[in-house]
Amino acid sequence: MRNHLKIFYDALWAEHIRLSTGKLVKPFKDRHEFGKMQLSDGFINEKPEWFHRVDDAFATENTANYIITLADQRMMMGDYRYGRITRQNLDNYDVISEFWRRRKIAVDTENLEYIVDMYNMVRIQSHKDKKIPKYFEMFKKDYRRAVRENWQLISIDDGIHAVEK
């Protein structure tokens, strides 16, 4: 168990460095491996059908695979923090409000990280409702703007999930 945690935290730190500096420290291997540990019972193997449907609908966009990969990585980290998305009770989670909150921050800061968050909100809402939400078109419009204006990806994770004691 200790070795698996070390591999996980090493990969998490490498991802933080990559997002903060743009430097690739230790790349994720194919199918989201952390070192030699395959996340076989995690997000990738249980990726909800509607996540795949949204990914397929989005895949025609320029550089969409980059956003899909980043979104998958964030969902995978969420599996460790909160449990698998397929096993969470999402009834009390206001995905639509979270989408619009993140959209406002994305537009205000021009940070691509929030575009990734918006994309995951679209996927989560699709999973809940078993249909692609209408605001997916707004997401694609904002995504195209971010690409056109070359928004930067600035890691925001530490500020949201870290609480001072």
Image (cartoon, rainbow, N blue to C red):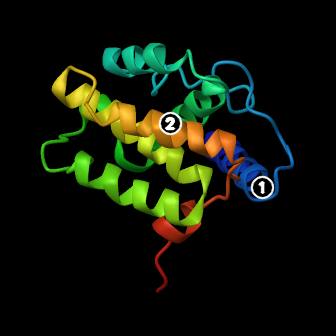
Q: Secondary structure at mark 1?
A: helix
Location of mark 2 (residue): 76
Q: How many discs mark residues in the rendered view?
A: 2
- In the picture, the quarter occupied by the N terminus is top right
Q: Is residue 49 above or below residue 34?
A: above
Local crowd size for mark 1, using a 10 Å CA cut-off: few (<14), some (14–19), many (≥20): some
Picture residue at 71% right of the left edge, 53% below the top: 152
Mark number, residue 17: 1
Q: Earlier in the sequence, mark 1 or mark 2?
A: 1
Q: Nearer the viewer, residue 2 or 24?
A: 24
Q: Residue at x 46, y 86 (%)?
A: 165
Type of residue at label 1?
Ile
> Disc 2 on helix, strand or loop?
helix
Q: How many C-alpha atoms fall within 10 Å of the one at disc 2: few (<14), some, or many (≥20)? A: many
CA gap, disc 1 and disc 2: 18 Å
List x then y, in percent, for residue 30. Answer: 71, 19
Query: Looking at the picture, does residue 102 appear above or below residue 66?
Result: below
Q: Position of residue 135 (x, y in %)?
A: 30, 37
Task: Confirm whether residue 84 shows in the render.
Answer: no
**Residue 151 on image: x %, y %:** 68, 51
Q: Is residue 34 visible?
A: yes
Decide: is 3 above or below 157: above
